[in-house]
Amino acid sequence: MTNNSDHNDITVYKLDHEGREVWNYRGKMLSRGTTWIEIEARFNRDDKDAGYVIFRRNDRFLEWFYSDRWYNIFEIHDVTSDALKGWYCNISRPAMISGHEIRSDDLALDLWITPTGNIQLLDEDEFAALPLDPDTRKAALSAMRDLVRRVEKREAPFEALLPFVSPDSFQNRD
C-alpha cells in the first residue's frame, strides 16, 4: 500500500471563538519547535480585495502558530512576483498543535502590517461584540500589544521589514 501523504503535510483548522470549524486548508511544515510551528500554504480562496491588500488565489503564506502565544502570524507573498505584501496577524487563543494538525480559535481582532511597518488594527467592532470572559479579552489585547512591540523591534518574523523612507528624501535638491 502506498501512502501519498507527505510526513510534512499539515492541516490547519480555523475555528471561531467557540471552537467551531470555519474552514480548513493544507500546508507543508517547514520547521517546528516545542511551542511553535512554521508552515507554508497557498491562499485557497478566490481573489479578495480587503481594502488594505488584495489576497490572490495561490498567494504564498508563511505561517507561524504558537501553543504559548495568543496570536498567529501569516507572512504573505504575491502569487506572481513572490514580493512581500505584508503580515496578517490573527489574535487567537494559543494554537493546538498535534501530529499533522493545527487548530486555532480566532478571536476576530487582527493586525495588518505593511512591508514598511505601518500597522493597521482590524475588526475591533467584531472583537468587541464577542461574548468573551474578561481574562480572554485581556489576554487578546495583551497579544495585540506584544505584536506591535515585535514589529517595532523587528523581531522574527518582522526582521524583513523594509527601511522607512521619509518623503523628505525625495525633495528636489538643486
Image (cartoon, helix red, strand yellow):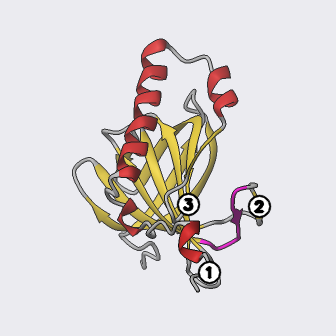
Q: Which residue is mark 3?
A: 114
Quadrant of the image containing the C terminus? bottom right
The reply to whether the C-beta atoms of the residues labelled 3 and 2 are less than 8 Å apart is no
- Name the mark nearer the viewer: 3 or 1: 1
Q: Which residues are magenta?
A: 52-59
The reply to whether the C-beta atoms of the residues labelled 2 and 1 are less than 8 Å apart is no
Residue type beneath disc 3? Thr
Q: Residues within 10 Å of mark 2 (few under 14, many from 20)?
A: few
68, 20: nearer the viewer: 68
Quadrant of the image containing the N terminus? bottom left
Q: Earlier in the sequence, mark 2 or mark 1?
A: 2
Q: Earlier in the sequence, mark 3 or mark 2?
A: 2
The reply to whether the C-beta atoms of the residues labelled 3 and 1 are less than 8 Å apart is no
- Name the mark nearer the viewer: 3 or 2: 3
Taking the spot 51% from the left edge, 49% from the top edge, the residue there is 89
Q: Is residue 69 visible?
A: yes
User: In which image quadrant can residue 172 be found?
Assistant: bottom right
- Does 69 sit left or right of 56 as displayed? left
3, 97: nearer the viewer: 97
**Residue 170 percent location from the top left of the image:** 59, 76
Vertical relation: 142 (above or below) 38: above
Residue type beneath disc 1? Asn
Residues under labels 2 and 1: Cα distance?
38 Å
Helix or strand or loop: what does disc 3 sit on?
loop
Instruction: Give residue 48's mark.
Output: 2
- Name the mark nearer the viewer: 2 or 1: 1
Q: Earlier in the sequence, mark 3 or mark 1?
A: 3
Q: Which residue is mark 1?
A: 172
